[in-house]
Image: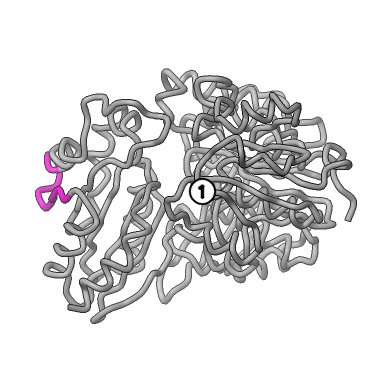
C-alpha cells in the first residue's frame, strides 16, 4: 500500500503516550503501512493495552532519553505527559529526529484522501465510528482513526486502507497544552465536516463559549468549495456559529428547520427505529442497535455524510443496522444476580443527561444506579452548577473523587465531595464515596435484582468493573 507523502522514507516511529486511544488508533494506521511502531507510556492500565499487545506493539513504562536508544525515523507525541516538553521529545530534538504531535500527524496521514472529520463536544467517537462502519460495510475500504479502543463490528478503531475516505475525530482541544494552544482539528483539511454540538468545555484553554464558537467557525471556514458541513441544527450554539457561513451546509436534527429531519423514533427491545425526511423524501424503518436520542442524531449525521459520499439509502441503512457500538460508550460489561452493569465515557453535563435519558428509555421499569467519577478539577469547577442538574433520571447517584489530569497542578478548590453536595441540591438520593473499594462495597449492599448500574467518567473508572462485579456476587 502506498504511504502518505510524509511517511515515504519512514520505517520506524516512536509514540510518546502510545496508550491514549487516539495515539493507539494512529499507531495501528502506521503499522498497517508496514512501519515499525514502538512507544512509551505510564504504568497505569488503559483500555488500549490489550490491542497493543495483540498487535505486538511494545512500549516502555515511563519516559526517558534511553527509550530513543534505537533511533526512530519519526517521533509522535501526545498532548499529555508534558506534550512538546516531554523528556523524550526534547531528546529527539537534540538527536535531530523529526517530531510531530498526534494532531499534526493525524492531519498529515489524512492528506490525499477525502477526509471526514467529526467534531463537537460529545458524539465525536460514536458518530465517526458509525460513518466508518457504514463505509466499511459498503465495501469502500475506508481508513479511520477514532478515539476508542474497539468499534463493533469492524474491530480496532485505527486502520489505514486503500479506499478514498479517511474518517477521523476532530478535537477542539489544544495541540500541546501550554506550549501550543492551537486547536487540534486545525491540522485537518477534510472534505466533510460533521459537527454534533458546540458547548463550553476545556476551561483551561477557552475563556468562554464565544471563544469556543469562534474556534469552530474558523475550522468550518476552511472547507473546500466542493465540501460539506453536516451540522446539528438542534444545538443553539451551532445555529449561531454557522449563521451566514459561506460554505455548503446540510443541517440535521429533530427541528422542523432541519434538512435531514428526524420524523419519529421508537426505543425498545434492544433496538432503536426512526425515520428521516430529506427534501420531500421519507426514509422509513432505519434501525440502529444502540440506545438514545443522541444516537439517532449521530446516525442521522452519518446518513447525511454517507449520502454526500455517494452511497444509496439501502446501503446506508444496512451499514447502520450493523453498527454495534463503541467501547466505553454505553458498553454492556456484565450481569450478576440479574443486576446489569454498563459503562460510559460521559464526562460533560450534557453527555450525562443524554446517557441517562437513553438508559431510562431502554429500561423504563428498572432502577438506575449511577457512579460518576468527575474528570479534571478545571472542568468540574467551571461546570459545577451544570453537573449538579445532570442526574435527574437516576434513582441513586454515587459521586467519587475527581480524576485529575496530568496537566493539572492543583485542585482549584473543588472536590468530589463538593460536587456531591451540589448534586444533592437537586436530587436527594446522592452519596459521596471516594474510591473503588468504597463504591464496590456500597453497590454490593445496595443493588438488587433488576437494577441497572452505569459507571461514568473519562478517568480510571473503567478499571473498577471486576471489583464491582465481585462485590455484587457476594
Q: Quadrant of residue 339?
A: bottom left
Residue carrying label 1: 61
Q: Main secondary structure of the magenta part?
A: loop
In the figure, is residue 354 to the left or right of 110?
left
- Which residue is at 25% across, 55% downward? 371
Per the image, is 427 magenta?
yes
Q: Quadrant of the C terminus?
A: bottom left
Q: Position of residue 75 (x, y in %)?
A: 69, 37
Residue 257 part of the magenta-drawn span: no
**Residue 211: x percent and y percent?**
49, 19
**On the image, which quarter does residue 169 sit in?**
top right
Q: Nearer the viewer, residue 429 or 50?
A: 50
**Which residues, given as a range, are shown in magenta?**
424-433
Residue 100: horizontal and vertical position, in percent?
Answer: 69, 32
Visible residue check, residue 213: yes
Return the residue nearer the eye: 457 or 81: 81
> Hey, which residue is sitting farthest bottom in the picture?
337
At x 48% / y 67%, what residue is drawn?
A: 272
**Can I make out residue 279 in this image?**
no
Query: In the rendered image of this protein, does residue 93 appear above or below residue 106?
Result: above
Residue 193's place in the image compared with 129, above or below, is above
Image height check: is 308 above or below 71?
Answer: below
Q: Could you tell me residue 457's position as x and y percent?
A: 36, 49
Amino acid at each position: 500500500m502506498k504511504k502518505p507523502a510524509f511517511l515515504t522514507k519512514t520505517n520506524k516511529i516512536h509514540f510518546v503516550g502510545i496508550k491514549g486511544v487516539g495515539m493507539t488508533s494512529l499507531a495501528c494506521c502506521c503499522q498497517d503501512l508496514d512501519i515499525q511502531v514502538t512507544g512509551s507510556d505510564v504504568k497505569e492500565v488503559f483500555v488500549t493495552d490489550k490491542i497493543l499487545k495483540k498487535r505486538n506493539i511494545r512500549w516502555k513504562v515511563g519516559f526517558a532519553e534511553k527509550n530513543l536508544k534505537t533511533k526512530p525515523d519519526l517521533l509522535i507525541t501526545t498532548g499529555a505527559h508534558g506534550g512538546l516538553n516531554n523528556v523524550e521529545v526534547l531528546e529527539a530534538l537534540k538527536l535531530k529526529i523529526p517530531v510531530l504531535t498526534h494532531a499534526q500527524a493525524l492531519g498529515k496521514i489524512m492528506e490525499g484522501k477525502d477526509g471526514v472529520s467529526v467534531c463537537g463536544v460529545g458524539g465525536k467517537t460514536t458518530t465517526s465510528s458509525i460513518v466508518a462502519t457504514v463505509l466499511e460495510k459498503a465495501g469502500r475500504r475506508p481508513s479511520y482513526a477514532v478515539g476508542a479502543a474497539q468499534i463493533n463490528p469492524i474491530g480496532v478503531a485505527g486502520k489505514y486502507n486503500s479506499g478514498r475516505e479517511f474518517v477521523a475525530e476532530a478535537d477542539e482541544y489544544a495541540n500541546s497544552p501550554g506550549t501550543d494552544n492551537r486547536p487540534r482539528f486545525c491540522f485537518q483539511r477534510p472534505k466533510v465536516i460533521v459537527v454534533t454540538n458546540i458547548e463550553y468545555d476545556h476551561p483551561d484553554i477557552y475563556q468562554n463559549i464565544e471563544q469556543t464558537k469562534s474556534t469552530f467557525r474558523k475550522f468550518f471556514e476552511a472547507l473546500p468549495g466542493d465540501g460539506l458541513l453536516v451540522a446539528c441544527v438542534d444545538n443553539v450554539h451551532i445555529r449561531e456559529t454557522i449563521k451566514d457561513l459561506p460554505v455548503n451546509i446540510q443541517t440535521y436534527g429533530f427541528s422542523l428547520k432541519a434538512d435531514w429531519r428526524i420524523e419519529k423514533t421508537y426505543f425498545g427491545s434492544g433496538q432503536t427505529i426512526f425515520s428521516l425526511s430529506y427534501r420531500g423524501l421519507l426514509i422509513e424503518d432505519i434501525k440502529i442497535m444502540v440506545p438514545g436520542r443522541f444516537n439517532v442524531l449521530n446516525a442521522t449525521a452519518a446518513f447525511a455524510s454517507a449520502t454526500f459520499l455517494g452511497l444509496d439509502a439501502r446501503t446506508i441503512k444496512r451499514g447502520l443496522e450493523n453498527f454495534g457500538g463503541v467501547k466505553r460508550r454505553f458498553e454492556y460489561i456484565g450481569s450478576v444476580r440479574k443486576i446489569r452493569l454498563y459503562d460510559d465515557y460521559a464526562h460533560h453535563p450534557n453527555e450525562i443527561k443524554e446517557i441517562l435519558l437513553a438508559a431510562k428509555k431502554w429500561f423504563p421499569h428498572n432502577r438506575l444506579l449511577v457512579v460518576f467519577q468527575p474528570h479534571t478539577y478545571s472542568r468540574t469547577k467551571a461546570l459545577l452548577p451544570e453537573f449538579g442538574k445532570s442526574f435527574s433520571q437516576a434513582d441513586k447517584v454515587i459521586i467519587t473523587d475527581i480524576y485529575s489530569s496530568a496537566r493539572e497542578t492543583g485542585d482549584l478548590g473543588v472536590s468530589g465531595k463538593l460536587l456531591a453536595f451540589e448534586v444533592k441540591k437537586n436530587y436527594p438520593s446522592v452519596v459521596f464515596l471516594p474510591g473503588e473499594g468504597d463504591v464496590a462495597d456500597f453497590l454490593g449492599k445496595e443493588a438488587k435484582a433488576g437494577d441497572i448500574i452505569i459507571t461514568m467518567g473519562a478517568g480510571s473508572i473503567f478499571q473498577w468493573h471486576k471489583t464491582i462485579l465481585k462485590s455484587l456476587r457476594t
